[in-house]
Image (cartoon, rainbow, N blue to C red):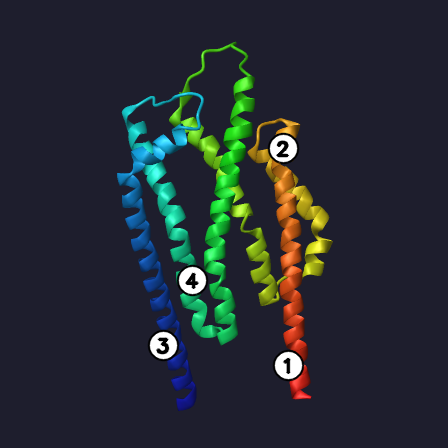
Amino acid sequence: MADEQQFDNEKEMNVVGHLSELRNRLIVTAVFFILFFAAGFVYVEEIYDFIAADLPFTLSVTGLTDLISVYITLAGLIAIVGTLPILCLQIWLFIKPGLTKPERKVTLLYVPVIFVLFLIGIVFGYTIFVELIVPFLLSLNNDMFVEIFTYDRYFKLLFRIVIPFALFFEIPIIAMFLTRLGIITPAFMRKSRKYAYLILVIIGALITPPDFMLQLVVAVPLVVLYEISILLSQTVYRKKLKKHEEFMNEDS
């Protein structure tokens, strides 16, 4: 009875310890988010000038509170991008004690890769938006109306395109991670290919204007990302099988 009570106490202490560590990790992440947000707030004019340089028109605001929204939106974007690697590192540090030494080395490499893929996704989505979507939408007017482009509507449309791309570019690294954990396999991804394609095409149609060529331009990179994910999953899976075979041979 005493042993059971001691076991329960130790288990409770472990849970409390994990929750306390998780809280500390989240606090560290929040502090960096605030710091990056403050930095973005200070340099919001430079950030806005960089974005506005690609526009063939001038953005307008319809009220004084819109100016505050401009600062919060742009500073928040910088904070999210800057905090992402910090968040990934804190998650890795939290799960580190439960990993073997080889697993620690491999999973640590995921942190910079996630950040780089996120940035590539943002750049790709932004390029698609500025070079294809904006010219297409402007061409629909054909001098029929007086155009007033507000900051609020422009950035809502911009984020609707760019953020999904930034997340979709994480598909390969997510596939590798889930394969390493044994949650998915390359065979499963191949079997689900047609359903994945359908979902990606639907998503491409949802985040782009109703033009077939634009939807195709968006859907094709997503399909390519899925195929790359299958190849990377296959690579991780083969390494897992090889290690398993070596382990079995050693035991025999």
Please name the residue that numbered disc 1 is placed on: 247
Q: Residue at x 52, y 67 (%)?
A: 106
Neighbourhood count class around disc 2 (C-alpha, 10 Å): few under 14, some 14–19, many 20 upward: some
Neighbourhood count class around disc 4 (C-alpha, 10 Å): few under 14, some 14–19, many 20 upward: some
- Report helix, strand or loop for mark 1: helix
Q: Residue at x 48, y 42 (%)?
A: 122
Above or below for 43 versus 25: above
Please name the residue that numbered disc 4 is placed on: 91
Judging depth in this view, the residue of 199 and 6 nearest the camera is: 199
Query: What's under tag 2, amino acid-wise?
Result: Gln
Point out the tag, 3 or 1, that comes first from the N-terminus. Answer: 3
Q: Residue at x 55, y 46 (%)?
A: 168
Cα distance between the residues tagged 4 and 2: 35 Å
Judging depth in this view, the residue of 107 and 192 nearest the camera is: 107
Mark 3 vs mark 2, foreground winner is 2
Above or below for 104 versus 219: below
Query: What's under tag 3, amino acid-wise?
Result: Met
Q: Which mark is residue 13?
A: 3
Coordinates of residue 155 in the picture (x, y in percent): 43, 31
Coordinates of residue 101 in the picture (x, y in percent): 49, 75
Which quadrant is home to the N terminus? Answer: bottom left
Coordinates of residue 242 in the picture (x, y in percent): 66, 73
- 45 relative to 237 in the view: left or right: left
Cα distance between the residues tagged 1 and 2: 48 Å
Please name the residue that numbered disc 2 is placed on: 215
Query: What's under tag 4, amino acid-wise?
Result: Ile
